[in-house]
Amino acid sequence: MGPMTAFLDGALEEVETLNNFSKHYICKGRRSIALAATLLQQGEIVAFPTDTIYGLAGIVSDNSSIEKLYKIKGRDENKPLSISINNANMIKLWGVVDHLPKELLTTILPGPYTIILKRTENLNPAFNPNHDTVGIRIPNFSFINCVAEIVGPLALTSANVSNEPNCIHASEFKHLWPKLGGIFYNVSLNDRLKKRFRKGSTIVDLSEPGYYKIVRFGVGGTSLISFLRKIGLKDVN
């Protein structure tokens, strides 16, 4: 962990102190990364901005955290969650990639995409237990990726109650704040840019060798399809 160690050592006490006043934090620097990691390690659900919409996150390896995440969203337990990791080279730990063209994932990730792959045995068996695939995200936002590097894969879903619109501002899910351990803000992204992100990430199924399937056309969808066709993948439809 190197320089992060000192920040993590002090984060527990700081979280306890700050929670007496506020659960709102700015995504800036190692201190806030350590605070987010500590909250997650305490089993809390945390709201993060991503490179598209706001997300709610827990730790994939923590079963109680996953249960809490479903409860907060009012989400059908049979509807799978995605995971968010920090590095494209680590995808092979959680999803089967042997059939994919070389450098496909490192070319498009980090980016506004959720990649569906066959899951590996490394993934927590209690996470999406009735599904043999998993959606994997690496947002183009270093803050959430740094947090995932510390705590491991994050269970990630949109920051809203199921069937409600996606959120690009924390104020839009204010009714969920009391149930969350922390709400983090990216103040560097202006409102004009945020508006086009509301449709969320493009979800693409790459689990079948030689084919792709667009499950949800979102941010960057046109560019992704063009790239996948260029490298020889065919639309499963």
Image (tube, rainbow, N blue to C red):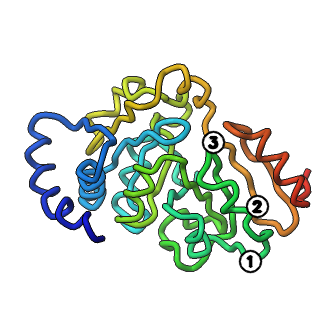
- Between residues 28 and 124, which one lies in front from this camera angle? 28
- Residue marked by disc 2: 206
- Residue displayed at 41% across by 31% down: 188
- Between residues 73 and 88, which one lies in front from this camera angle? 88
Residue 43 percent location from the top left of the image: 28, 58
- Residue displayed at 37% across by 30% down: 187
Cα distance between the residues tagged 2 and 1: 11 Å
- Residue 201, numbered label: 3
User: Could you tell me which secondary element the residue under label 1 belongs to?
Assistant: loop
User: Could you tell me which secondary element the residue under label 2 belongs to?
Assistant: loop
Instruction: Work out whether mark 2 precedes mark 1 in sequence or the reverse, and give the earlier one.
Output: 1
**Apparent side of residue 122 relative to residue 40 in the rendered image (left or right):** right
Q: Residues within 10 Å of mark 1 (few under 14, many from 20)?
A: few
Q: Residues within 10 Å of mark 3 (few under 14, many from 20)?
A: many
Cα distance between the residues tagged 2 and 3: 15 Å
- Residue 65, above or below 51: below
- Between residues 134 and 146, which one lies in front from this camera angle? 146
User: Could you tell me which secondary element the residue under label 3 belongs to?
Assistant: loop
- Residue displayed at 83% across by 54% down: 228
- Residue displayed at 11% across by 49% down: 16
Q: Amino acid at mark 2?
A: Leu
Q: Image quadrant of residue 11? A: bottom left
Residue 146 percent location from the top left of the image: 40, 57
Q: Amino acid at mark 1?
A: Asp
**Apparent side of residue 68 relative to residue 50 in the rendered image (left or right):** left
Cα distance between the residues tagged 3 and 1: 24 Å
- Residue marked by disc 1: 98
Q: Quadrant of the N terminus?
A: bottom left
Q: Are marks 2 and 3 in contact (CB under 8 Å)?
A: no
Instruction: Work out whether mark 3 precedes mark 1 in sequence or the reverse, and give the earlier one.
Output: 1
